[in-house]
Amino acid sequence: LEELYLSIHRELIRLGESYAECAGMGATLTLGWFTPQWLYFAHLGDSRLYYLPREGGIRQLSHDHSYVGWLRREGRINEREAREHPGRNSLQQALGAGHQFVDPQIGALAHRPGDRFLLCSDGVIDGLW
């Protein structure tokens, strides 16, 4: 998965260098690969991956590649403060976008029948609040 993300990143940078209308173009990407017992996932940016276990509840598996996301992971701000922070949509990492370094989040989670997952943009969750 990491090799896939690095390949996409290089291609987006190449497109930006080859076509003026693509200069600075970037993207976020969250993907999952399901096997009968495992979800393998990769993530970069501020799209989201949530886990909804069959017992109830919701847990965000992906973390935002933004300064505000880092502040939240460090415990310096809470969820409400992160939602209202003026820099919440400013990414530190994205595929392409002229970024020279990307470090995608790679993970795996065991799942069972009845568990659900939600892959969405950050805007979906913002609308729910």
Image: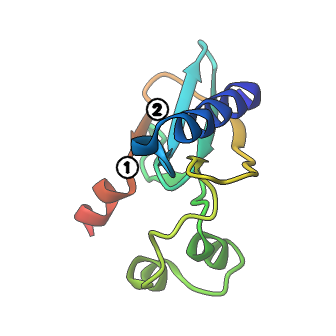
Closer to the camera, 73 or 11? 11
Mark 2 element type: loop
Q: Which mark is residue 115?
A: 2
Is residue 65 shown above or below 70? above
Residue 68 in view: yes
Q: Which residue is pictured at 58% across the width and 51% down the height?
A: 94
CA neighbours of label 2 inside 10 A, class few (<14), some (14 to 19), many (20+): few
Q: Residue at x 57, y 60 (%)?
A: 64
Residue that appears at 54% across and 83% down: 78
Say what secondary structure mark 1 lies in. loop
Q: Is 119 or 46 nearer to us in this picture?
A: 46
Picture coordinates of residue 115, whole percent (x, y): 46, 32
Mark 2: amino acid: Asp
Q: Residue at x 76, y 51 (%)?
A: 101
Three-letter amino acid code of the residue under disc 1: Ser
Please name the residue that numbered disc 1 is placed on.
Answer: 121
Mark 1 → mark 2, Cα distance in angstroms:
20 Å
Query: Where's residue 93, x and y in %?
Result: 63, 57
> Who is closer to the viewer here, 34 or 7?
7
Q: Is residue 55 visible?
A: no
Question: Quarter of the image containing the N terminus?
Answer: top right
Q: Percent from the top left, x then y, of residue 103?
A: 75, 48
Q: Quadrant of residue 43?
A: top right
